[in-house]
Amino acid sequence: MNKVRITVMKTARYDDLIEKYENPITDACDMREGMVFIANGWRRPEGFCESAWESMSAFVMALAHGGGGFYDGWMKNERSAMISCNDGFRPVSFLIETMDEEAD
């Protein structure tokens, strides 16, 4: 089993939707472009958003165990995937990539 690198590639914020539909919250997403997390095999990295993890954990698990080639050639690098979290107000796009380093 290998480690998997998770990089925050793009963040968005839809203030019009937030204003119209979201109840005020005090602890919104704190992901920033360029942040990098390392998943030790299938384990969620410390400090990583639980909701985002739910969106990508199956892909991380597959990549950590040598899988890839999702959706018949979707990614140029078959040992990677571009996954977005499921927050419709503040979506974040993550690049997840298999590392050549063994998980602990």
Image: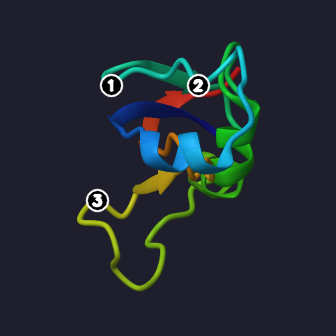
Along the viewing direction, whichever of 77 and 6 lies nearer the viewer: 6
Badge 3 vs badge 1, beta-carbon distance below 8 Å = no
* x then y, percent, for residue 93: 42, 45
The amino acid type, in three-letter code, at marker 1 is: Glu
Which of the two labelled residues, at mark 2 and mark 3, occupies the earlier sequence position? 2
Residue 72 lies, with reference to residue 25, above or below; the image says: below
The residue mark sitting in front, 2 or 3, is: 2
The amino acid type, in three-letter code, at marker 2 is: Cys
Check disc 2 and report its element: helix, strand or loop: loop
Q: Quadrant of the C terminus?
A: top right
Along the viewing direction, whichever of 64 and 33 lies nearer the viewer: 33
Badge 3 is on which residue? Answer: 77
Q: Is residue 71 left or right of residue 102?
A: left
Q: Residue at x 40, y 18 (%)?
A: 35
The Cα–Cα distance between marks 3 and 1, rounded to whole angstroms, is 21 Å
The answer to whether any part of residue 96 appears in the image is no
Badge 1 is on which residue? Answer: 33
Quarter of the view holding residue 69? bottom left
Q: Is residue 28 left or right of residue 77?
A: right
Q: Residue at x 58, y 29 (%)?
A: 102
Along the viewing direction, whichever of 68 and 56 lies nearer the viewer: 56
Check disc 1 and report its element: helix, strand or loop: loop
The amino acid type, in three-letter code, at marker 3 is: Asn
Q: Residue at x 61, y 45 (%)?
A: 64
Badge 2 vs badge 1, beta-carbon distance below 8 Å = no
Badge 2 is on which residue? Answer: 29
The answer to whether any part of residue 44 appears in the image is yes
The Cα–Cα distance between marks 2 and 1, rounded to whole angstroms, is 12 Å
Mark 2 Cα shell of 10 Å, populated few (<14), some (14-19), many (≥20): some
Q: Quadrant of the N terminus?
A: top right
